[in-house]
Amino acid sequence: MISTQYFIFFFLFSFVSSHDTSIIFTTLGRSTYAFDIFAFPTTHPQTEFQLTDGNSVNFNGHFPASLPPSLLSRLPDDDSVNSGKLPFHLIYVTERNGTHHIFYDAVFHGVGERRAILEFPPQTESTRVQVPLVGFEQSGGRVSMKDKPSLSGEFLIYVSTHEDSGVPRTSWAAVYSTHLGSGLTRRLTPKGVADFSPAVSPSGVWTAVASYGGKGWSGEVEELATDIYVFMTRDGSGRVKVVEHGGWPTWADEYTLYFHRRCDDGWWSVFKAVLPKSGVHSVSTQRVTPPGLHVFTPASSPANKNLIAVATRRAGSEYRHIELFDVVSKKFTEITKPVSPHAHHLNPFFSPDSSWVGYHKCRGSGNGRESDTLLLENLRNPIPGISLFRIDGSFPSFSPNGDRIAYVRLPGLYVVNYDGSGLRQISSRTAFSTAWDPKRKGVIYTSFGPTFASESTEVDIISINVDDEDLSYKQMTIGGQNNAFPSPSPDGKWIVFRSGRSGHKNLYIMDALEGEVGGLRRLTEGSWTDTMCNWSPDGEWIAFASDRENPGSGSFEMYMIHPNGTGLKKVIQSGTGGRTNHPYFSPDGKYIVFTSDYAAVSAEPISNPHHYQPYGDIYVIKSDGSDIRRLTHNSYEDGTPAWGPTFIKPVDVEWPNGGHPCSFEDCHWLNVRPNASVMDASFGLGSAKIECAQ
């Protein structure tokens, strides 16, 4: 314990020179989620009820069957509350105040003289009782992700990422149990193992999870190659694998599990597993939902063992919806589409008596709030003195004195003051990777052209003076062989950039005033990709990402090199096959912020909207490759970080025009329509054999 405290003290003390600075980064679509939890009655579904309070992002709910005494004791002295007659007791995950929490809400709807919650103004005190259960404080003051909570008696079961796995590219996600009375927390997942999507059996004796077991994550970004394990909820003992290939388990009774998997015919489907009452050597599985549509994230209820709630993506649909599926009659009943056809609905869950089905979706225009989206969202930073912000854009960069931020929105180039004022669109063209000139006020370097393109794609670097009334710009590169990621030297004389002009993406240095016509030399050379370069503040080093150890593999590591081409060294890699990208020096040059899959994946990707890679967090490291520190914890993809010299007040900044809530996209790989001709006669949809393991 003494050595750990010393290390933490030393690490924080060593960051003193980088205090009073800010780090910004992007998370694709996250600013427009505006998730709240809603519910529909399963019989005669006509009206959906909003259950959460419209504050931040609320998701992955659970209706507990009963409340333990320790939780009841924390509720107000109200007969309607303590009688347990409320129709909605809700446990859920919420991201607020810059970190994850698990909350309990008692939602008053049609109880006694209480009116429906939606008839009240938002956050009226008399409409709900709200109790934080687990958060930053309960994690020992450590920033972490919380996910997939369940309440079983006095114990809250959930996923957390607060413990370092100790191995690069190994997930920190593990299942924990917290006793609500004492606060005592126990890890149920074995050390060296990652667990996802826990589900507690009706009796509370067993917990099922999706897990790699001991094999670990191999880099999947769509369906994780997990199996279903079961263990005793009280202490994690008796752990055994019961199903090969499956995720998102849910219990119908003590011996029946439903789960999802992607089948050989391309469709996501729900399966049923029947566990033996003694031993685990004869588990039988059966596909219960047909091909022809994607069906995933199932929920079941012991009150009706033949009914499951599922999320679906039907052929030709752009949205995922919640439906009920009768496993006996094999009939679907639409729940959300008739009422809310043009919205995504995620991760259903049943009330204990199966009379209600809950889910989360974007709340749209909001619950009486002026704005639902944030231009800058403040996150709790585990490193004191450095403010951390998510920006609703990509490839941000700070002006030399830190008072302005440039970023892109694919398409479009924008500039905004660090407090959110003065937002301007500079260009409507597709641009990426912004950088400010350190000597010429108002000059920004970027590149115009397609992103994620081949070496020969026409992409050129330009400079543009955003303080010029005419927004004059100059083309810096010639020929358009995918020239991108410009970064100027601190003296303003040179620009390092990535180019594919040789047939491979390598680094070059050109004149900062005249571009390549004023001087050009090659910095790196090889049949690999060197990219995402950033020049150190003292001018001595250039940091960049490269796949030179395994060209074309998609695996990138971080390197540094002197501007004269000497001193090449690797700073860090994220395990075999990992990704470490977008390095950016701190203002004093002693540290580098970057994005990486160093902590692997933290949740099943299909449980979230689209991300290019549903993993990746923001880290800082000393420029010598020591003292790596994780800054962000979530199940999204955090990327394109930048480090500026100004400490931005850690307060959220709303979009000045209200933003565009609900503008995120569903997983792109669900848009691909598999072979719909593969049907099965048992579902009345054709005669071909299902190409999926039973």
Image (cartoon, rainbow, N blue to C red):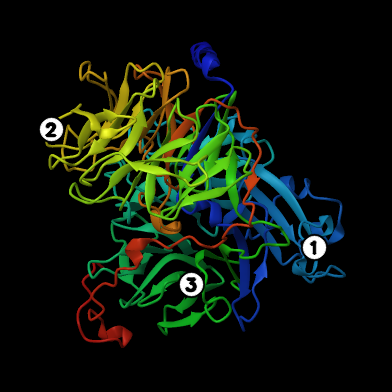
Q: Which residue is mark 1?
A: 121
Local secondary structure at mark 2: loop
x, y percentage for residue 290?
A: 33, 77
Chain-order first, disc 1 or disc 2:
1
Nearer to me, 79 or 458:
458
Chain-order first, disc 1 or disc 3:
1
Q: What is the spatial separation of the Cα atoms under label 2 and label 3, in whole angstroms?
A: 48 Å
Query: What's under tag 1, amino acid-wise?
Result: Pro
Query: Which mark, residue 136?
Result: none
Nearer to me, 425 or 40:
425
Q: What is the spatial separation of the Cα atoms under label 1 and label 2, in whole angstroms?
A: 63 Å
In the displayed structure image, the side of residue 569 where residue 82 appears, left or right: right
Query: What's under tag 2, amino acid-wise?
Result: Gly
Local secondary structure at mark 1: loop
Q: Which residue is mark 3?
A: 321
Q: Which residue is mark 2?
A: 526
Dividing the picture into quadrants, the one containing residue 297 is bottom left
Q: Residues within 10 Å of mark 2 (few under 14, many from 20)?
A: few
